[in-house]
Image (spheres, rainbow, N blue to C red):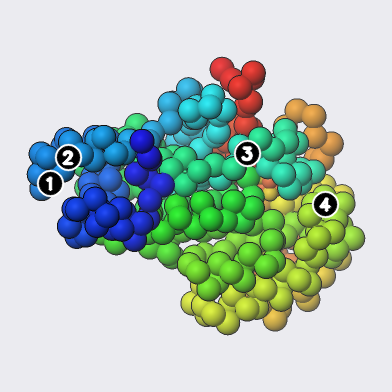
Amino acid sequence: MDGILNCTIGELEKIFENNGFPKYRAKQVFVWLYRFGSRAFDGMTNISRNMQNELSKMFYIYRPIIANVRHSSDGTIKFLFQLADLNTIETVFIPETRRNTICISTQVGCTVGCKFCNTGYNGFIRNLTAEEIISQFLAVKDYLKLWDSEKERLSNIVYMGMGEPLFNYENVLKSMQNLMYDENEGISRRRITLSTSGIAPVIEQLAKDLPCRLAISLHAPNDYIRSQIMPINNIYNIESILNTCKIYSNYHKYLKITFEYLLLKDINDTDECAHELIALLKPIHAKVNLIQFNQWKGCSFAPSKRAQRFSNILQKAGLEAPIRARRGVDIMAACGQLQSHGREERI
Ligand code: SF4
């Protein structure tokens, strides 16, 4: 039996045609899956009983097991999902005044190994399948009972959880295609942000395949500092990343690129760093998101106390540079704090 969430609309149409079902039925099934959150075929009332039975034999509709849920005092909720192979991943729901955002994971662990990140520190286990990525969104909607809600919507998705999304490109692309499919649900490409450590050739590919909002984890104004805190910089350095960002911007002028900059005490938070960053980003249609470091056990970095000053320098030079609000710190749900748990460590 196959997981239907792993199929794009085009793939499902082909499968239906090969099995003697009308092609247009695929669209109807997609609406049940993504707009109404159906977890079984027998509730799909505009589809014949016979076809419902056949679909039940061909496909399952995947959901991970909710192994743990933690609520922050600021309303943020962190989910620990257990996958079929007993590995676990974390997903974060972030309510805000005018929108609700879900931060989803794309890998169990991460190979990139940024020195400041708890996920990277814990190593890499495997890529998530498309259905495991998509079902984080669906399972959070199930849990929060958001399917029928007129007021409350899960409006924004950020691919900023565990893992480097561009190292799992095929499945990430498929998940975005499926989540964007139903326009009525409001998940347009402007509401999806993919955050990457800067896998330059794949960024260029994304610009062609399915552009969405792009966030680059830059975290340093020069290669010397960046290579110390992000070893991936030895493969894709700042120049190569910025070159692909220019291509991305040329393709999609309306999508402003965000550069994430985690402020680490005495590493990248000096006035000189701020001025270097201004010079670096001036030629790009960019915004800088300043992030305050959230400490975790075993890491050697300290949070900077210069965030406001750093932001002022950038803003004075005309760069948009807000300090991102810290969310879910008390439940270890903030940036860089997510952890994977291997089979042996699960709770
Ligand atoms: S910051 Fe992102 S890319 Fe870097 S190790 Fe953590 S999860 Fe991986």
Tell whether circle 1 marks a residue whose Cβ is less than 8 angstroms from ligand 1: no
Q: Tag 3's secondary structure?
A: strand
Q: Residue at x 10, y 44 (%)?
A: 48
What's the CA distance linking mark 2 and mark 1?
7 Å
Which residue is tagged 1? 47
Which residue is tagged 4? 231
Residue 256, by quadrant, is bottom right
Is disc 3 surrounded by few (<14), some (14 to 19) or many (20+) residues within 10 Å? some
Residue 340 in the image: state x and y as whole percent: 62, 31
The amino acid sitting under disc 1 is Ile
Identify which residue, 331 or 133, lies in the foreground.
Answer: 133
Q: Are marks 4 and 1 in contact (CB under 8 Å)?
A: no
Which residue is tagged 2? 52
The amino acid sitting under disc 2 is Gln
The amino acid sitting under disc 4 is Pro
Figure check: 132 above or below 165: above
Residue 27 visible in the snapshot: no
Q: Earlier in the sequence, mark 4 or mark 3?
A: 3
In the rendered image, which quarter contains the N terminus? top left
Residue 180 in the image: state x and y as whole percent: 37, 59
Of tags 4 and 1, the one toward the viewer is 1
The amino acid sitting under disc 3 is Arg
Q: Tag 2's secondary structure?
A: helix
Identify which residue, 37 or 24, lies in the foreground.
Answer: 24
**What label sits on residue 126 in the rendered view?**
3
Identify which residue, 195 or 207, lies in the foreground.
Answer: 207
What's the CA distance linking mark 4 and mark 3?
20 Å
Tell whether circle 2 marks a residue whose Cβ is less than 8 angstroms from ligand 1: no
Residue 292 located left or right of residue 347: right
Q: Are marks 2 and 1 in contact (CB under 8 Å)?
A: yes
Q: Earlier in the sequence, mark 2 or mark 1?
A: 1
